[in-house]
Image: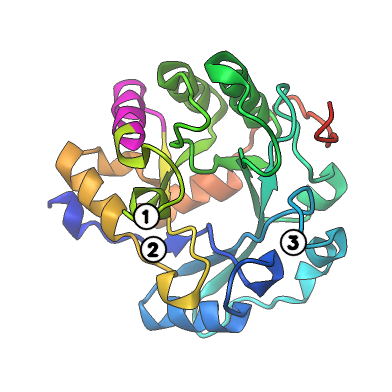
Amino acid sequence: MGRGDMVLIADLHTHSIASGHAYSTIRENIQQAAMIGLRYYGISDHTPGMRDTTVMGYFHNLRVLKSPIEKVEILKGAEANIVSRRGTIDLPAEIASRLDYVIASLHDIVIENMGIVGNTEAVIGAMHNPHVRIIGHPDDSRYPLHYPEIARAAKETGVALELNNSSLSPASSRVGGMVNAKELLEQCAAVGASVVVNSDSHIWYDVGNFIYAKALLDELRFPEHLVLNASASGMAKLLGQDRSRTYLPAASAAE
C-alpha cells in the first residue's frame, strides 16, 4: 500500500474560536470530523501564555465535553507553549493531568529563537514532562533544531513528533517546513521514533486535512507503523502508555 492510501483516523491538533485567531466552533469542527470519517477528534486550543487567547478556566471546564459525539471519540487536549530553555510549559500540572494529551510547541510570539542548541534543549526538556505526548510543528527554520538528537529523545521518551500539514502548505507562515519535515522524518525512520500527523486546523474545513503530509510520507516511504494515528493500537500507545518521566513545572516566559 502506498502511503498516499494510508488511512489516518485521528486529528489531534485543531483550534476553535477559543484560541482567538481561529474561526470555527468546537461543534463545527466535530461535525467535519464526523463527515470525513475520523474516529478521534482532539481539541487543542492555545494556552494562556500566548496573548489574546484562552484563560486557564477554559481547560478546567473541558470536562463538559461529552464523548462520543456523532460517533467520534472526543479527546481533550491543549497546545501549550514552551517558555524556557529548560522546556517548561505554560500549563500547570493540575490542569494538564486532567487532559487526554498536551502538545508542546515553540511559538514566535511567546519565546525568542534560542539558537539550535537552546531550541533543541528546550524541546527535549518538554519531552520529559509526563503530560506532553506530542511536540508540535518541530519544522520551522525560525527555531532550528538538531534533528538526530530530537529523534533519539523522542524514541527514548515515547513522545510523538508532529508532521504538521499546515507547515507543509505553500501558504504557511512557518519557514522551511518541507525541507525540515523531510529531515525530521528521515531521522525518525532511522531510530524508530514515532510521529503523529495533524492538520493544525484553524477553520472547520481543514479538520482532517492531511494532503501535504500524506504526500510526503508516500514520497519518503515512511514506515506506517511509526505513524501513531494510522491505527487504533497507535492511538492507544500515544494516549495510554505509562511514561514515568521527570515533571518540569509550569514557568513564566521570563525564566
Q: Is residue 120 left or right of residue 17?
A: left
Q: Which residue is mark 1?
A: 231
Q: Residue at x 44, y 24 (%)?
A: 151
Measured Cα–Cα span from mark 1 to mark 3: 32 Å
| Badge number at residue 53 | 3
Nearest the viewer among 243 and 5 is 5
Q: Residue at x 36, y 78 (%)?
A: 36
Measured Cα–Cα span from mark 2 to mark 3: 28 Å
Q: Is residue 125 left or right of residue 24?
A: right
Dot 2: element:
loop
Question: Closer to the camera: disc 2 or disc 1?
Answer: 2
Which callout, 2 or 3, points at the residue further toward the start of the chain? 2
Query: Which amino acid does the dot numbered 1 rest on?
Result: Ser
Q: Which residue is mark 2?
A: 9
Query: Which amino acid does the dot numbered 3 rest on?
Result: Thr
Res 208 → quadrant? bottom left
Which callout, 2 or 1, points at the residue further toward the start of the chain? 2
* Crowd band around label 3 with a 10 angstrom C-alpha radius: few (<14), some (14–19), many (20+): some
* Crowd band around label 1 with a 10 angstrom C-alpha radius: few (<14), some (14–19), many (20+): some
Nearest the viewer among 20 and 244 is 20
Task: Tell me which secondary structure the magenta stretch mostly adopts.
Answer: helix
| Badge number at residue 124 | none
Measured Cα–Cα span from mark 2 to mark 1: 7 Å
The segment highlighted magenta reads 180-193
